Image (spheres, rainbow, N blue to C red):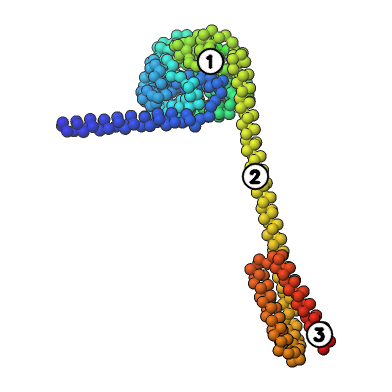
């Protein structure tokens, strides 16, 4: 028994060491990724800080509800030592919903990591979050317009939990839509677009599940699922001070193209997503209707420059805030940086084109030289063939005439003639070798011409001497 117990302890220690090693490796990779991410503008980082608050809330709520563990277990380096969430607990979920929301929670871990990479030193630790049953009960009492008995508990069953989940991702979705046109850099827009795509998918899954049960009553309140979603959406509109939200069933004029009451996705008359400003996002998740009054899921308010500005008495709208503090200056600097980048790229392209043109000219010159050489070579070959034809036709006649000439000449003249013949043969062999090697130049041409002229003069002299004799 003792050995079995010891072996179990050893296995447990080994497993713990493996987990710690994996977490360290993941944390090291996380820090290394900072070097690969391009810098965002300060204004971009401050806008994305708004989203970071919501991503912390979603990650903790989904992970704890599905598996009973949160960021401190799965990614402690992202929590950065922030306070432990209030009221987190494992929900009583069926296997399918537990699996779906565990996946959602892990997706939020990825979102947090991506945002930390982009924000770098602007990424803050996990803020204080409150997802206790008491907070949820207050929220639903306010939405329904009366105190629910018993208090609404999102953790007691699957349907209650999905209704509570209906309240969170959609706020983040509309926050991303509202932030996108305010962002300056391409990198920030790319990051927000990626986050928006997954948040939209999560909201669609939640709404689809609830739409299937829209006529079902939520026990013991005698209120249907569709009525719950309508009440929650109306409350969010009230807190945001704008019409940005719709339930699962709406009046026909508000449905898609005004042809149906079904509203599986919330969108405007052109089926485009609504957008919230940072001020509206905080006013909604605080549950107070004001970005300057913390509460709800954020007892001490959100973190980041914009959240803190509202909490410390900044009553300006988002547009006024961005005009006074960041937008113009950042936009000009960003435009300047983009212009300098474009100029550098243009210079590089022009250098490449210039280099290409020079290489092209060199290739053309080489081609012309080769073409000229081939042309000269053809002319040499043609001249040589003509020379061979003439030489072949007149050889027999020359031999006969030479015999006759040699009969009347003395020994001294015979020697001179022999030397001439040797000289001619040497010249012909020399010309043949040069043509075969394709290296006959101008000098060889001139020499060949001189040899011809010398031979012609000598033959002419011999003929004259013969005539005189």
**Percent x, y for residue 314?**
55, 9
What residue sits right under mark 3 in the picture? Answer: 465
What residue sits right under mark 2 in the picture? Answer: 355
What residue sits right under mark 1 in the picture? Answer: 306
Q: Quadrant of residue 14?
A: top left
**Percent x, y for residue 248?**
53, 22
Q: Can residue 452 be seen in this view?
A: yes
Q: In this view, does 147 lie above or below 332?
A: above
**Quadrant containing the N terminus in the rendered view:** top left
Picture residue at 69% right of the left edge, 81% below the top? 419
Picture residue at 36% right of the left edge, 29% below the top? 24
Q: Quadrant of residue 100?
A: top left
Between 2 and 208, the one lying in front of the other is: 2
Q: Is residue 238 above or below residue 60?
A: above
**Percent x, y for residue 135?**
43, 12
Q: Under tag 3, what secondary structure?
A: helix
Q: What is the crowding at mark 1: few (fewer than 14 residues within 10 Å), some, or many (at least 20)?
A: many
Looking at the image, is mark 1 or mark 3 earlier in the sequence?
Answer: 1
Please, which residue is most extreme toward the right here?
A: 468
Answer with left or right where residue 4 lies relative to residue 162. left
Between 110 and 21, the one lying in front of the other is: 21
Q: How far apart are marks 1 and 3 (CA)?
A: 119 Å
Q: Quadrant of residue 380?
A: bottom right
């Amino acid at each position: 028994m003792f050995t079995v117990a010891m072996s179990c302890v050893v296995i447990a220690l080994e497993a713990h060491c493996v987990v710690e090693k994996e977490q360290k490796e993941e944390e090291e990779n996380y820090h290394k990724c900072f070097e690969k991410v391009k810098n965002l503008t300060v204004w971009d980082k401050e806008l994305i800080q708004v989203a970071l608050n919501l991503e912390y809330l979603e990650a903790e709520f989904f992970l704890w509800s599905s598996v009973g563990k949160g960021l401190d277990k799965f990614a402690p380096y992202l929590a950065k030592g922030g306070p432990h969430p209030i009221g987190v607990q494992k929900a009583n979920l069926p296997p399918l919903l537990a699996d779906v929301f565990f996946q959602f929670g892990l997706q939020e871990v990825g979102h947090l990591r991506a945002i930390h990479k982009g924000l770098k030193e602007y990424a803050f630790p996990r803020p204080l979050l409150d997802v206790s049953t008491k907070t949820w009960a207050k929220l639903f009492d306010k939405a329904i317009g009366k105190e629910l008995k018993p208090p609404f508990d999102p953790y007691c069953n699957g349907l209650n939990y999905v209704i509570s989940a209906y309240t969170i991702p959609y706020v983040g979705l509309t926050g991303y839509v509202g932030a996108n046109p305010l962002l300056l850099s391409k990198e920030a827009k790319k990051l927000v677009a990626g986050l928006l795509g997954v948040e939209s998918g999560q909201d669609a899954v939640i709404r689809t599940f609830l739409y299937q049960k829209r006529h079902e009553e939520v026990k013991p309140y005698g209120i249907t699922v569709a009525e719950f979603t309508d009440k929650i959406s109306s409350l969010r509109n009230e807190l945001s001070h704008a019409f940005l939200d719709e339930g699962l069933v709406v009046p026909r004029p508000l449905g898609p193209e005004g042809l149906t009451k079904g509203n599986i996705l919330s969108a405007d008359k052109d089926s485009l997503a609504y957008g919230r400003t940072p001020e509206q996002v905080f006013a909604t998740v605080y549950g107070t209707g004001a970005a300057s009054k913390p509460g709800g899921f954020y007892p001490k308010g959100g973190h980041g420059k914009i959240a803190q500005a509202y909490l410390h008495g900044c009553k300006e709208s988002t547009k006024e805030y961005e005009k006074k503090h960041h937008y113009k200056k950042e936009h000009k600097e960003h435009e300047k940086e983009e212009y300098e980048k474009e100029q550098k790229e243009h210079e590089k392209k022009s250098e490449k084109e210039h280099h290409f043109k020079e290489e092209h000219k060199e290739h053309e010159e080489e081609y012309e030289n080769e073409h000229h050489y081939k042309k000269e070579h053809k002319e040499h070959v043609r001249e040589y063939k003509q020379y061979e034809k003439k030489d072949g036709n007149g050889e027999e006649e020359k031999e006969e005439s030479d015999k006759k000439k040699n009969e009347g000449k003395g020994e001294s003249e015979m020697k001179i003639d022999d030397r001439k013949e040797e000289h001619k043969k040497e010249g012909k062999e020399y010309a043949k070798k040069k043509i075969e090697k394709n290296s006959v130049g101008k000098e060889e041409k001139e020499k060949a011409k001189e040899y011809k002229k010398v031979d012609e003069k000598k033959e002419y002299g011999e003929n004259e001497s013969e005539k005189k004799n």
